[in-house]
Image: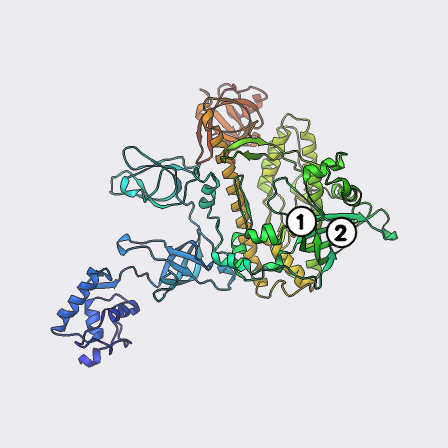
Amino acid sequence: MKQKSRGKTPHGKPHATSRATTDRGLPSKEQILEFLNSAQGKAGKREIARAFGVSGGARIALKRILAEMAADGTLTGDRKHLKEKGKLPPVTTLEVTGRDGDGDLIAKPLHWDEDEGKRPTVRLSLSARSSDNDIGIGDRVLAKLTKLPRGSGGSFYEATPIKKLPKEKRRLLGIFRTSKRGGGTIEPIDRKELKSWPILPDDMGGASDGDLVRFELVRRGKFATPGAEIVESLGNPDDQRQISLIAIHAHGIPEDFPESVMKECETLSPPTMDRREDLRAVPLLTIDPIDARDHDDAVHAELDSDPKNEGGFIVTVAIADVAHYIRPDSKVDREAQLRGNSVYFPDRVVPMLPEKISNDLCSLREGEERACLAVHMVFDRHGEKRRHKFVRAMMRSAAKLSYQEAQAAIDGQPSEKCEPLMERALKPLWAAYRAVAVARNKRGPLDLDLPERRIVLDDKGRVARVVTPERLEAHRLIEEFMIQANVAAAETLEEKRLPLVYRVHDAPSAEKLKGLRDFLETLDMKVPHAGALRPEAFNKVLEQAKSLPVPDLISEVILRSQSQAEYAPKNIGHFGLNLVRYAHFTSPIRRYADLIVHRALIRALDLGADGLTDEEIPRLASVAKAISDTERRAMSAERETTDRLIAAHLADRIGTTFHARVAGVTRSGLFVRLKDTGADGYIPISSLGDDYYHHIEASHALVGARTGAGYRLGDTVEVRLLEAIPSAGALRFEMLTPASRGNFAALKAGLRGGPRKRFGKFQRRR
């Protein structure tokens, strides 16, 4: 009977190591661990003895071995349920925390008992499935685990994702401040959660004063006050002079490139002239911001010599040939897809591509040969496009110009560099633009020209000043030629019936349109109903708004009513640009969507062997969603960093009075925007005075029930700064301007007898 039971698992299955026991008939420690790891249910001392045929006095010796294993930390549990210490279950929830030297994603178990030892590292094994391609740092996945042999690159497990789980609402991050009494507090980085958390000395986790930390909430008793425990220190934004560090970690933005990606970049080399058009003698120009960090587009225009197109132009837009260097499913490609786009902070750039590519191989430097994917577009004298053609080419930029330098040249003040380019490059370029601008105006895209403030930092990483760069004709020229090239790319791929990722922008929703219409009616302005809606209708409102005191705020309200543009494999057109089809082609250095379009064009036009692959096509939908998400992530991170920099800039000006405008009205208070810096701050409704204020959503107003006086969107006011929290980018003000009676009489009457549905719900506006 003993022989029969010998070598059986707790479920009666033969055990592979049952015969390889010690000389005394006892299993070795390695065999015990192997048995416990393979057991499909709970296994204790009794199951081990049964599996290895241990009986009688040998059970005492087995008990001694198990006690030794527990003492040296190999085993954990009790006699009925033993397991290898630190062992993870076959299926568990993981949090993706980073990447290893090979660029593979690594994760750690979401739930872990510290008594089990150090939290183990798990290497993610991603398949070609589309659902695996949008897993990135900060995500949570349910995964099946396989234990790896010792010495497997620092990871003890390999995980195959079963499914990606919904993201946690927010990562618990804050700035740690030490206390003289020991321990400290965590300052919030989320303006919606302005609460500090106490940290005991034993819960500091090695963090230093000013560190950005990740923490967990803890309660050490049923009636104890909740506290926090620091899990990880992420660096000091002040020491590094990079306040963007907060947004990078808060949003899980990949920062450093894995070593394997950097090594792959070192093997890249420029292409030859094989099958490329020679554009090296064409005076292509790069025209960018003064502080541009990458140069991936160049333009040229000339009169069309075709007598059938008298007065027409040939415009060439040349874009860096990123697809030559980044092949599908390479390490650099997977990293670029994970990032989705570059992120531009005032204090740094987190690029989509390593510097070797973005600032060297694919940067269209003045006077240097570079590979490009170019489109020649033929326009008639009215600016209507007749035809276009895409080619792979080799170019040499004739000059690197800033917008200001190019504009000054056209305005009659050419620099020494621009002087020889006037007749053969700059004047033809502007002549072509002015023709194309006629067609653009006829098309009637949404003409939202909001001022864009720019933060200038000093050498210490602090705000030196906030400027609003002038919007020049040079900006519009480059913008329009890029739009035309993007349209040409979408048209070509549709003609060749090749799947692509469109840049789509839906019309405003009925709900947002109603809110906009209600607001405009209070200003005696109207917008047509959705059935007849075109961008031109908004442009008429914007033109009328120029005669009002607050045209920029009217523009912003219209902007808020718009849908958000995104990437999609299904075309619905682009409402804002008033285009039937549109795709992104012109910025493959900083947008993965453009790289996909480049590959699609290469495949569709047989321009090389490095085009879109069969494996990529089924994944386009998931890739489009992923890069839409990374774009929104970047926008939020950039905006939050700007808010934090401005709050830090104003932190030493508590008590100062500022000129501002009411930029948002909610049920709980007012948002105001300072005129000089564009900073946004909040005024709680409880601080507005002794009246009882009602929120009238349709009119974007707060109106006093007793006095009938109030505040409305766009009002010019004076405010005093009461509080600044740089870590959260939060500013709180006091209203100094008394409420105005203005034209609120009708609104006050509505408060007394009108329908209650006029009062809006709380809506935080940012």
Sequence-earlier tag: 1 or 2 = 2
Please indicate, yes or no, whether residue 569 appears anywhere in the rendered image.
no
In depth, the one of 347 and 570 nearer the eye is 347
Q: Name the side, left or right, on which 479 lies relative to 344.
A: right
Q: Name the side, left or right, on which 503 lies relative to 654.
A: right
Q: Look at the numbered discs 1 and 2 and tell me whether their residues touch, using CB distance below 8 Å.
A: no
Q: Nearer the viewer, mark 1 or mark 2?
A: 2
Residue 401, horizontal then vertical, whole percent: 68, 42
Residue at 37% x, 61% y is 155
User: Callout 2: 10 Å neighbours few (<14), some, many (20+)?
Assistant: some
Whole-number angstrom distance, CA of label 1 to CA of label 2: 14 Å
The image shows residue 124, relative to residue 205, as above or below, that is below
User: Callout 1: 10 Å neighbours few (<14), some, many (20+)?
Assistant: many
In depth, the one of 35 and 234 nearer the eye is 234
Callout 2 amino acid: Val
Residue at 65% x, 37% y is 448
Residue 297's disc is 1
**Where is the N terminus found, in terms of image quarters?**
bottom left
Callout 1 amino acid: Asp
Q: Secondary structure at mark 2?
A: loop
Please indicate, yes or no, whether residue 616 appears anywhere in the rendered image.
yes
| Figure quadrant of residue 604 | bottom right
Residue at 57% x, 29% y is 699
The residue carrying mark 2 is 282
Q: Name the side, left or right, on which 222 lies relative to 411.
A: left
The image shows residue 76, relative to residue 450, as above or below, that is below
Q: What residue occupies the far right of the structure in this picture?
A: 307
Residue 678, horizontal then vertical, whole percent: 55, 31
